[in-house]
Amino acid sequence: MVVNYKELGLVNTRDLFKKAMAGKYAIPAFNFNNMEQMQAIVQACVETQSPVILQISKGARQYANQTLLRYMAQGAVEYAKELGVNVPIVLHLDHGDSFELCKSCIEYGFSSVMIDGSHLPYEENIKLTAKVVEYAHQYDVTVEGELGVLAGVEDEVSAEHHTYTRPEEVQDFLQHTGVDSLAISIGTSHGANKFKPEQCQRNADGVLIPPPLRFDILEAIEKLIPGFPIVLHGSSSVPQDLVAIINKYGGAMKDAIGIPEEQLRRAATSAVCKINIDSDGRIAMTAAVREVLANKPAEFDPRKYLGPARDGLKQLYMHKIVNVLGSDHKI
Ligand code: G3H
Ligand code: 13P
Ligand code: ZN
């Protein structure tokens, strides 16, 4: 089955990033694996009039089935229209780890792919990324590459420490690969435990404040490649009120610490045009499900706990769009 994303009503990232750069905001890239997440994303984007990048990881594709996902993305476009707003929707592969996976996603209607060669030696990263770009551009599919390694787990690859992006490599990487956007490492990481408590300071209210992102590296990169779209992975803030609900109702999320929202707000006004958020959505859903099941132990209708989970998720996404990324009313 080969389908071009344009037939599904999807768009690539090119124009969205151009507008985001000029308007000093970032496009939300929300991961999804199931219907409730997709509904929450579309509802939030319709209400706030925000463009969106629907992100699917290799694991999500294995979990949900590639064919179903392709129809869900097409469904997302139609659902938004039914709700009255023609939301620009990108279907993006998150952390593609091979040429074959990227090619397969393009054949299944993705409008954008990430090829993550960040764990490879520099020359191999270039070779793999350039191969994906050459293939993707034939179909007007945009490509995100990555330089620098985030600490933590990215699909099946994990690294204990950050390797910050080296600004001196970015021009050469762009020249030799032809990527449309670049993910960089400036201190974010994946998951809900981005910092150890001992790395953080306590403010007057006893709240743990993590070390700031390396805006100096971001600024050095911006100077070298002015106007080029930058992507920030690992951008969940791990809302402490939601973590408290999870732990109150039987959860055990220990030392969960994210990126403060003010820092992401600052990043969104820079060349950062795409901000990736997955863990916060997982936390919002889990908090709502745990609360319902703890308060109503006799409940066994999934709609009674997945419905509130979807509502919680929608609120979280609306908050991110309006107060953190600034992508509302940018359709
Ligand atoms: O970067 C990782 C994303 O949060 C996707 O996570 O591989 O568990 O679907 P996943
Ligand atoms: P978080 O784990 O911080 O949500 O990051 C998600 C991400 O970068 C997906 O690629
Ligand atoms: Zn990521």
Image (cartoon, grey):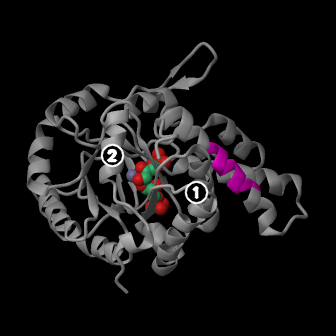
Measured along the vertical axis of the image, is residue 22 above or below residue 100?
A: above
Instruction: Characterize the local packing of mark 1: few (<14), some (14-19) or many (20 or more) Cα atoms within 10 angstroms.
Output: many
Mark identifier at residue 277: none
Q: Name the residue under label 2.
A: 17
**Does the stretch in magenta take in 18?**
no
The answer to whether residue 170 is left or right of residue 70 is: left
Where residue 14 appears, as percent x and y from the top left, is: 29, 52
Q: Name the residue under label 1.
A: 42
The answer to whether residue 215 is left or right of residue 226 is: right
Q: In which quarter of the image is residue 189?
A: top left
Q: Which amino acid does label 2 sit on?
A: Phe
Which quadrant is the N terminus positioned in? bottom left
Where residue 140 appears, as percent x and y from the top left, is: 25, 65
Q: How many marks?
A: 2
The mark that comes first in sequence, 2 or 1, is 2
Q: Which amino acid does label 1 sit on?
A: Val
Q: What element carries label 2?
A: helix
The answer to whether residue 24 is left or right of residue 311 is: left
Where residue 108 appears, as percent x and y from the top left, is: 38, 77
Magenta-highlighted residues: 308-316
Residue 256 appears in the picture as rendered: no
The answer to whether residue 237 is left or right of residue 177 is: right
Q: Is mark 1 on a helix, strand or loop?
A: helix
Where residue 31 appears, as percent x and y from the top left, is: 49, 57
Q: Quadrant of residue 114?
A: bottom left
Measured along the vertical axis of the image, is residue 330 above or below residue 208?
A: below
Residue pushed farthest bottom? 1
The secondary structure that most of the magenta stretch takes on is helix
| Residue drawn 63% across the image and 35% down it | 240
